[in-house]
Amino acid sequence: MREIQAQQITQTIRQLCIDANCHLAGDVKNQIKQCRSCETFPVAQGILDKIIQNYEIADENVVPICQDTGVACVFLEIGQDVHVNGNLEEAVHEGVRQGYQDGYLRKSVVADPLNRVNTKDNTPAMIYYDIVPGDGFKITVAPKGFGSENMSQIKMLKPSDGLQGVKDFILKVVKEAGPNPCPPIVVGVGIGGTFDKAATMAKRALLRPVDSHNPNPFYAQLEDEMLEKVNALGIGPQGFGGKTTALGVNIEYFPTHIAGLPCAVNINCHVTRHKSAEL
Amino acid sequence: MEKRIVMPFTAEKAKELKAGDSVLITGVIYTARDAAHKRLVELLEKGEPLPMDVKDSMIFYVGPTPAKPGQALGSAGPTTSYRMDAYAPQLLDVGLRGMIGKGLRSPEVIDAMKRNTAVYFGAIGGAGALLSKCIKKAEVIAYPDLGAEAIHRLEVEDFPAVVVIDSQGNNLYETGRAEYLNGLK
């Protein structure tokens, strides 16, 4: 059995928090540039130029791309043949604590949703565990801003709503979000499973490269179709009009109950952040 | 071509701006977001003075990141404005002239803006590193216990923004999208 020290997990998460918040991932940068070259509306072109300038400043000065450095969503893929020496969960929170302190990142977490006192160190992280075969240990940190999180929705559709119901719901969520989530957005969709499974899939869909496709050709085609439909809404960068409302639509699906068709839409902004490391 | 606004932001200056205008703001503005707004409005309801003079001033809806050595303030882009809609009319009624944020506003806020000749500006959401460069000085003047949500007094220079809703209630979120879609026909 492979041994991993908790301290190594803390150090890795510390660095991933800083890197994810200050350096936009290559797939998102490429997609923003690609959209800039296709954008025809002058106002939208100007905004996309500023967005590019912004992530370049962040890269160069190692400062946060966006002031909402998010709640730290930490995804762990743990090989079943791995043993962690120490307290795994505390190691994750400690990594977030150190990363947000040392990286001059904003502390945006309140300890209680109703009494709302800031924890002052951005903990706790939101931790997602997956046990997988082998002895690998993969960590992904995805800081999630709440301007876009607040625009996300879930709906328990009926089987009779079918494909059309799913398409209508995705478009409704994007339309209602309008300028609020800092378009151009990335749309994560989870279809099937249960109430919570659909929501988790929608969040995980945002971890996939924005220019990637679902390996199932039916869902890959649906991603392309929905991206086209979303961009036909004309909301545009920052909601001032234009073609570039979304950089991508990523869809995940899972088996579900004979009575159900859950559909979750998790919205992310143009600062879609995720950084991974393997131990 | 951008219009320059030098603070204080009087009704005369506000009246000249139209939805869609690009502006560069210079002078003293204040930050406040969810928790600070709640406290400000509680003060107004008790008839007590606010920690800053909002008359002919602007509030920037932002919770910045901490400053790195050499910075006045960390990254500082706008937060979504609708969460301040419950509080904004009361501040507009005591003289607040401008709000900087992003996203939609309620009909109640737009009515209060028209009634008080005020302007709602949009700054680019998610461009916190870029906007930070326009902040020359920053100081916490109230509610330090709120951390990033404390009220800061900022000195800004050529801070870029767009008039989203003007003092007549014209709304760029409606006209901009319509202009783009009409252009496709």
Image: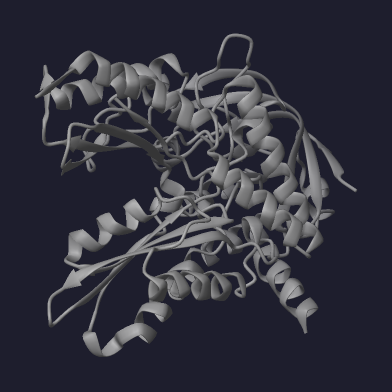
- Asked whether residue B79 appears in the rendered view, the answer is yes
Please report the residue visible at 76 percent of the width from the left and 55 percent of the height from the top. A45
- Depicted A62 relative to depicted B40: above or below: above
**B36 sits left or right of B108 in the view:** left
The percent position of residue A181, horizontal first and vertical second, equals 50, 54
Where's residue B35, x and y in %?
39, 37
A209 is higher (above) or lower (below) than A142: below
Q: Would you place residue B30 above or below residue A50 in this image?
A: above
Q: Tell me which corner region of the image, top left, top right, bottom left or bottom right, holds residue A87.
A: top left
> How many numbered badges does the structure rendering display?
0
* Figure quadrant of the C terminus of chain B: bottom right
Q: Residue furthest top?
A: B69
Find residue A82 and report its image quarter: top left
Left or right: B90 in relation to B143:
right
From where the camera sits, is residue B150 visible?
no
Expressed as whole percent of the image width and height from the top left, the position of residue B176 reads 72, 67
Drawn side of residue B113 relative to residue A196, left or right:
right
Q: Position of residue B43 (x, y in %)?
A: 42, 36
Q: What is the residue that sits farthest to the bottom in this orientation?
A: A160
Q: Relative to the observer, which residue lies in front, A100 or B172?
A: A100
Residue ID at (61%, 28%): A58
Name the foreground residue: B100 vs B46.
B100
Q: Residue at x 46, y 40 (%)?
A: A273
Q: How is the image coloured?
A: one colour
